[in-house]
């Protein structure tokens, strides 16, 4: 067996093990509370992937819903995974996403008469820049005065949430006579859906408008490719990984560590900001109170960890989390088991990964007691679990 | 391989569910009506709208041949998929709880013109908040001013007779955000209190929030320092802070929407919006083939709004006056205003 394959298999043991563990414990919880684990998971499977549906749910619709849910997870997952590689724990993907959605909404509403070829790039780039700016604050603070990015990004999440609240509750973006929603963005700022939004057109037995899969999917997949390319095929990616392995060694090798930290955060924020912009441009079309308690940027941390910070891993983990999100409702409707079980499963996955990375961390310290203490635990996991990515040797 | 195993699991689940279905339902003689309820992000245990809607659904299940299914929304992202889920499965009525779902109901009802929708406190709107007036959407509205007037009578009478804790002839209301349902409550409250005690001063403040109790507590404490004796919270979960602030300051408070007797000992009464009655009525209409599009308003006359007496024993004359005003509003000889009087 080639060593890369063996290595990949070994690397995947942890995430797959955590998912299996979560589903087993989740099943026990369902059974202990008087539910039927098998029908619960059948509901999740139906809701997430449209498979084995008991009540004739539409497979295409379920897949479409899952995809809509996982698009922002991919983008924010990248925004968490990239800083991990540099030894930075970006808890602020949510705040950066909000900054991006605010920028997208402001531009999309202000210039709502512009045609799509001009306005759509404007809102997407605007969202990415706003996210980059938001994360950049934490990056600059970390690089210059050493303020810990965990603290600053968490605080910036709150700032962003309250900014959204200010803007749409009695603030300048509020829809006249509306309540806690902004005006809708112009038609030119909207990402098209793959199927026409035409209710008279019947596709797979349902009006075409119900399939909300939008072209943001292509952007998300492109973002994954950019992430992988940046990390493994560019000198910046090399610097990011070097800083993540050991800042001291990186500095000794002539890498400008503060600059790398700032650039990493800027790029991560851009991914997150773009996620927010895509969510507005592709699905919501306005800023609403749902963003007060949106958790995409936090789920992204679990996605990045579960995906071991690799592009393929993030894709798979996003699909899983998107399917869980979509499946929860169907499970509750069909099997009568509260869709909160989905949150339980997600938390169990995160928990078991965290428990595992403690073990990994312990192993590190035992083997190499001189490991730099300033390194974030997540980064330790990343470097341990993905030591030899495919093709790295050739660069 | 993993795929086929998943499929197998699914098939097992399917078989189990079929078995369960066979066991529980005897051969149906007449049609079983399928009702789908979608909660907002408050979830079923919000002790308020969503809970009451579920109570109405459960009552309908015992009274009619109804299969009721509930899906909780965990974020605003879930509204459209959850409503769509029931619509694609040809449910006879899909109920959305709360005005937060207005746009989602507007969108989905347009895609499924043959499915009946009902929405509590809202209408099916477009992104600009304009009612699309789809012929398959019923809006379940409430005359909050009726409920507000009943607790206003209590507050006004207590002040007039010097039976409140301090009797400074000042009462107040803490609104969440200045939107029609909130202002309806406050309008009825102020109108009725002033009717009973013309010398009364009614303070009105807003927290600009429906969830954070600390915010409402601030507004409430300001009103208490401005000598408010009785505080009426009209701010949902945020308003729990009002009830606590009143309890700590030793004055009375009034709850909203659901009976909030247990939230704080200071709660003397609650203004009720009977979402359970509205949900039950909407289901009953569908079962009887009497679904109507447009607004259906619930008020004191049809027992869709009212009050509950909580941690207080009212003097007999106040109770008499309450019954008197209630009868007059029912009969239409008294009409509480829907806009806050000056």
Image: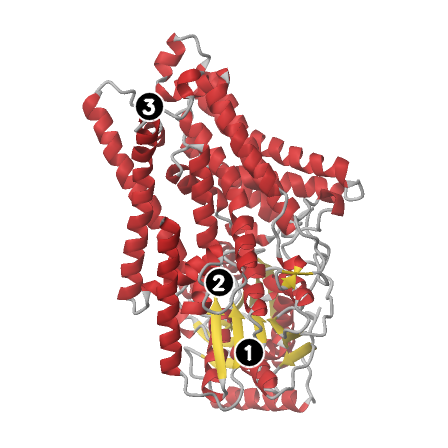
Q: In this rendering, would B205 be left or right of A390?
A: right
Badge number at residue B279: 1
Residue A84's spot in the image, x, y percent? 41, 29
CB-based contact (under 8 Å), mark 3 and mark 2: no
Q: Residues within 10 Å of mark 2 (few under 14, many from 20)?
A: many
**Image quarter hosting the C terminus of chain A:** top left
Both on one chain, marks 1 and 3?
no
Residue B154 appears in the rendering: no
* Residues at marks 1 and 3, CA–CA distance in whole angstroms: 57 Å
Seen in the picture, residue A128 relative to B309 is either above or below; the reply is above
Badge number at residue A327: none
Q: How is the image coloured?
A: secondary structure
Give the quadrant of residue A197: bottom right
Circle 2 residue: B42
Residue visible at 40% across and 68% down?
A335
Residue A326's spot in the image, x, y percent? 49, 56
Mark 1: which secondary structure? helix
Circle 3 residue: A374
Give the quadrant of residue B146: bottom right
Residue sitting at the far left: A366
In this rendered view, identify the residue nearer to me: B191 or A391: A391
């Amino acid at each position: 067996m080639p060593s890369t394959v063996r290595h990949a298999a070994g690397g995947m043991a942890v995430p797959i093990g955590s998912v299996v563990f979560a589903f087993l414990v989740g099943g026990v919880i369902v059974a202990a509370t008087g539910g039927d684990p098998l029908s619960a998971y059948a509901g999740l499977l139906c809701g997430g992937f449209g498979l084995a549906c008991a009540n004739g749910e539409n497979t295409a619709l379920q897949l479409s819903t899952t995809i809509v849910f996982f698009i922002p997870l991919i983008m924010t997952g990248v925004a968490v995974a990239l800083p991990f590689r540099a030894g930075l724990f970006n808890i602020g993907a949510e705040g950066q996403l909000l900054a991006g959605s605010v920028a997208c909404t402001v531009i999309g509403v202000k210039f709502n008469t512009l045609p799509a070829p001009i306005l759509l790039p404007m809102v997407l780039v605007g969202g990415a820049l706003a996210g980059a700016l938001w994360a950049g604050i934490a990056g600059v603070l970390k690089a210059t005065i050493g303020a810990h990015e965990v603290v600053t990004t968490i605080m910036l999440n709150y700032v962003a949430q309250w900014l959204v609240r200010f803007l749409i509750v009695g603030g300048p973006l509020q829809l006249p006579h509306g309540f806690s929603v902004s005006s809708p963005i112009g038609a030119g700022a909207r990402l098209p859906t793959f199927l026409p939004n035409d209710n008279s057109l019947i596709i797979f037995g349902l009006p075409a408008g119900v399939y909300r899969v939008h072209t943001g999917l292509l952007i998300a997949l492109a973002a994954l490719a950019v992430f992988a390319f940046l990390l493994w095929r560019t000198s910046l990616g090399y610097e990011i990984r070097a800083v993540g392995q050991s800042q001291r060694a990186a500095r000794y090798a002539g890498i400008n560590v503060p600059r790398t930290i700032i650039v990493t955060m800027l790029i991560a924020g851009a991914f997150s900001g773009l996620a927010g912009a895509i969510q507005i441009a592709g699905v919501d079309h306005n800023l609403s109170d749902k963003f007060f308690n949106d958790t995409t940027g936090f789920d992204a941390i679990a996605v990045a960890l579960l995906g071991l910070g690799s592009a393929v891993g993030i894709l798979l983990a996003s699909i899983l989390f998107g399917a869980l999100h979509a499946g929860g409702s169907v499970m509750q409707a069909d099997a009568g088991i509260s869709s909160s079980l989905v949150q339980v499963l997600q938390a169990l996955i995160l928990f078991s990964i965290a428990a595992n990375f403690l073990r990994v961390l312990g192993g590190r310290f035992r083997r190499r007691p001189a490991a730099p203490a300033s390194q974030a635990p997540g980064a330790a996991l990343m470097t341990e679990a993905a030591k030899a990515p495919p093709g790295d040797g050739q660069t | 391989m993993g795929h086929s195993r998943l499929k197998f699991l699914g098939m097992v689940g399917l078989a189990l569910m079929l078995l369960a279905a066979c066991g529980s339902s005897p051969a149906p003689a007449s049609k079983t009506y399928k009702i789908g309820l979608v909660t907002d992000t408050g979830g079923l245990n919000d002790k308020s709208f969503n809970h009451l809607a579920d109570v109405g659904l459960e009552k309908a299940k015992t009274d009619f041949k109804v299969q009721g299914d509930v899906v909780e929304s965990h974020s605003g992202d879930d509204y459209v998929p959850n409503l769509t889920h029931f619509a694609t499965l040809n449910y006879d009525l899909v109920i959305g709880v709360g005005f937060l779902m207005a746009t989602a109901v507007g969108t989905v009802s347009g895609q499924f013109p043959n499915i009946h929708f009902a929405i509590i406190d809202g209408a099916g709107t477009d992104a600009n908040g304009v009612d699309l007036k789809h012929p398959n959407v019923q809006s379940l509205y409430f005359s909050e001013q009726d409920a507000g007037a009943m607790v206003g009578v209590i507050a006004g009478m207590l002040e007039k007779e010097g039976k409140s804790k301090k009797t400074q002839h000042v009462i107040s209301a803490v609104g969440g955000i200045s939107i029609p349902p909130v202002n309806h409550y406050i309008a009825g409250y102020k109108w009725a209190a002033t009717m009973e005690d013309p010398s009364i001063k009614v303070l009105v403040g807003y927290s600009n929030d429906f969830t954070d109790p600390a915010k409402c507590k601030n507004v409430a404490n300001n009103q208490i320092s401005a000598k408010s004796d009785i505080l009426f919270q009209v701010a949902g979960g945020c308003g729990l802070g009002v009830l606590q602030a009143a309890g700590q300051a030793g004055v009375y408070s009034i709850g909203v929407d659901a009976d909030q007797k247990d939230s704080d000992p200071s709660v003397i009464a609650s203004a009720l919006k009977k979402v359970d009655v509205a949900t039950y009525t909407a289901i009953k209409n569908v079962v009887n083939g009497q679904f109507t599009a447009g607004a259906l308003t619930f008020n004191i006359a049809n027992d869709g709004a009212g009050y509950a007496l909580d941690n207080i024993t009212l003097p007999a004359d106040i109770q008499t006056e309450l019954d008197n005003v209630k009868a007059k509003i029912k009969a239409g000889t008294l009409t509480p205003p829907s806009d806050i009087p000056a």
